[in-house]
Image: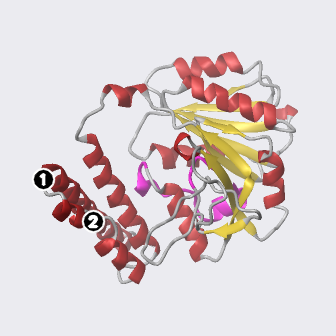
Amino acid sequence: MITSNQSPSSTSVSEVGFVIVTRDRPSELRDCLVSINSRSPSCVDVAIIDNSDESITMSQIEDLSNTLERVRIIYRRIPASRSVLAQGRNLGASLISSTLIAFLDDDTLLSESWFSACKEIFSDTSIAAGTGVIVEPDTLDLDPYESKPIGKLLNNGVLTDNFYLRPKTPVLIDHVRGCNWVIKHEVFDQFLGFDPAFEHVYEEADLCLRLWRAGKKILFHPGLEVEHRCAPRTNILRKRDPNLRFIQREENIKFYVFLLLKNLSPFSLKVLRYFLTVDTGILFLFKEPGIESLRHFLAGMSGRLKGLARYIGMALISRRSPM
């Protein structure tokens, strides 16, 4: 289904096309599309993959379709699943034919410098992917010029964030955050896109580490800036549970350990350092003993073991698969 005031034949292949996976955030998605339309110097394709519970998002897009002069919306609605982000982004990438693919979250707004920075990044033909500043509510009071590593894989296995920083010049990094980044379409296809095994988290980090292992360059450019509003979803707010933070901790660590094992090796010092020393919760357990501390510790240990089990299981399935 293509919903737009632009017909497919009325636009040529653009330099950059956008992919947005959305769920139950119609007003935020509207603002995101309006920002693309207002910032883009020419007509661009935007693939929207919608797994909302209700049809309000589709209605919002239909209302917008005749008002966005420089946005051609390609809309697909798919059922929610554990792997919706990876599968949805892969589907969205297959629906656009632009030279570059930009992945945004549905609650982001582009800055005025976004498109010019994107052009500057890929003027260097050796760059495979790029990202930039991500301004969020909890970064507004931080020093945006502080000297810290941006998007790096450290020796203890930790992937640094710090995407709110504004270095004076662009810097090479190891990974991106999924709410704001661009990759060459041919590179995305070459590396087979996102791995659905990551289900709902770290799929972009996995793809970036695969690029990193292959020697591909990822550039952080301060001009490729977005405002990420971190909007909540109503269905999550309705189901808020005091146990949720322990469940989320276990899930995040499980997929993070799987990420490191898949892209490094079980015997990598970075993996071992992360597995044994980073945020295990054991020091907190001894400092402030109690049920909450114990649950924090057990969630971390359970996540580590589940990540290891997932890696072993995937490795066995891969070996048994026919060539």
Residue to which mark 2 is pinned: 280
Q: Amino acid at mark 1?
A: Gly
90 sits left or right of 309 in the view = right
Which quarter of the figure is the N terminus placed in? top right
- Magenta-colored stretch includes residue 195: yes
Q: Residue at x 71, y 40 (%)?
A: 110
**Whether residue 35 can be seen here:** yes
List x then y, in percent, for residue 90.
57, 49
Q: Residue at x 33, y 25 (%)?
A: 238
Report whether residue 181 is seen: no
- Mark closest to the chain's N terminus, 2 or 1: 2
Identify the secondary structure beneath mark 1. loop
Query: Which of the labelled discs sits on residue 3, or is there none?
Result: none
Image location (x, y in percent) of residue 35:
73, 32
Are the residues tagged 2 and 1 within 8 Å (C-beta)?
A: no
Identify the residue position indicated by label 1 in the image: 290
Label 2 secondary element: loop
* Rendered location of residue 260, percent (x, y): 42, 70
Q: Amino acid at mark 2?
A: Thr
Indicate yes or no whether the magenta region holds residue 260. no
Task: Identify the residue shown where x is 79% and y is 40%.
Answer: 112
Lateral position of residue 14 relative to residue 289, left or right: right
Q: Is residue 129 above or below residue 115?
A: below
Q: Residue at x 84, y 33 (%)?
A: 9
Residue 76 located left or right of residue 159: right
- Locate residue 256: give its quadrant: bottom left
Which colour assignment does the render follow? Answer: secondary structure
Q: Which residues are magenta?
A: 177-200
The answer to which image quadrant residue 193 occupies is bottom right
- Please rate how many residues cluster around mark 2, counting C-alpha atoms within 10 Å: few if below 14, some from 14 to 19, many from 20: some
